[in-house]
Amino acid sequence: MKARVFVPLMLFLGALVPLMGAPGEKPLVVTTIAPLEGIVSEAFGDSVEVAYLIPPGADPHEYQLAASQIELLRRADVIVTTGGHLPVEKRIAELKKEGTIRADVLFIDDYMREGFRYLPEYWYNDKDNPHGIWLDPTNALAIAKATERALERVDGANANVYRVEYESFENRVMTVMHSYRAILKGEKSAVIQMPADQYAIEWLGIKAIASVKPEEEIPAMGVDELISTALKSDVIVYAVDSPDQLKDAVRELSAKSGKPLAEIRVFWSGRPYTEILIENSAAIIRALGEKAPENKPVAETDVTRYVALSLVAGIVLGTAIGVLIKK
């Protein structure tokens, strides 16, 4: 099992290696948010050093770069963004243009070349939803693939290593996707708490038909306004790491509409991407009252068997699956 390399932001000044150039040095990949660190660290393991910029708990739509973080970016070989819409990411684009940073910076166009997709906010004029894009495993693979290509550009001598690492990550993600997609039958719909939640459900075949908070700049809707819509849905989805006021609203909506609640995680740090993907998917499946099929699993792998058995038993998937998927 590969060791994961994780460099907390607070320690980077004393822990980061120098710029690449000497034999044996690893590329430094800086991500703007912690979930992207989870993708890069799991995909490329101990072949890279990884750090992230925005600390857990901070609002990514308000956060601004510190002077010390600009120095971190100057050291970076690859910078992975959520696409470019966050203030930090817009500042990175400016720093790249003016030549302050030399890293290969990945934006939305890089991901779209690898199969990335925006989902339309059906509840808000069908605009592209830029929030929580990493929760969709297809997008996570696009981000990882774009990172692999960037690593090949900055460290061509180890290009084959990065390709093999990516292929292993892709196999793990695809195994989880096939396992959970095989469970749900028929059309399903959900009321979500915030736009980011959409990316955790639509790849499963569950359409988000309303959002308690329609957009970042729009106030949350009242519970009574959403009851009629909730009654037409199958599940209500919310994030455990969201503000308490919004969590109270979805719980009230669930109580008044009689619809089940599914609790997912949008932001996290220090955990592998597939571990969160499995936990979120399992929570949604359980809320819908579904069971894993009793027949032969979709794919003959330890991951798929564990997913099926865990759903039947109704247990919460956690660290154990994280160990299995790295084998």
Image (tube, grey):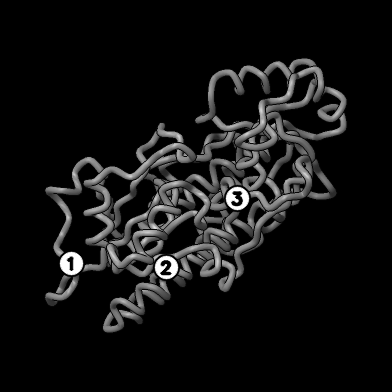
Can residue 324 be seen?
no
306 vs 22, nearest the viewer? 22
Closer to the eye: label 3 or 2: 3
x, y percentage for residue 8? 26, 44
Residue at 70% from the left image edge and 35% from the top image edge: 214
Q: Check the image and report above or below for 24 versus 48.
A: below
Q: Name which of mark 1 and mark 3 comes first in the sequence.
A: 1
- Is 265 left, or right, of 88 in this rendering? right
x, y percentage for residue 208? 75, 42
Q: How crowded is mark 2: few (under 14 residues within 10 Å), some or many (20 or more)?
A: many
Closer to the eye: label 2 or 1: 1
Numbered disc 3: secondary structure: loop
Q: Mark number for residue 19?
A: 1
Q: Name which of mark 2 and mark 1 comes first in the sequence.
A: 1
Q: Kindly identify the amino acid type of the residue bearing the numbered disc 2.
A: Thr
Q: Kindly identify the amino acid type of the residue bearing the numbered disc 3.
A: Pro
Residue at 49% from the left image edge and 45% from the top image edge: 276
Q: Quadrant of the N terminus?
A: bottom left
Q: Quadrant of residue 177?
A: bottom right
Residue at 65% from the left image edge and 61% from the top image edge: 117
Q: Check the image and report above or below for 225 versus 46.
A: above
Q: Name which of mark 3 and mark 2 comes first in the sequence.
A: 3
- Is 11 left, or right, of 315 in this rendering? left
Q: Check the image and report above or below for 218 versus 246.
A: below
Residue at image mark 2: 147
Q: Mark number for residue 130?
A: 3
Can residue 266 be seen?
yes
Cα separation, mark 3 vs mark 2, equals 19 Å
Numbered disc 1: secondary structure: loop
Q: Kindly identify the amino acid type of the residue bearing the numbered disc 1.
A: Leu
Q: Mark number for residue 190?
A: none
Q: How many marks?
A: 3
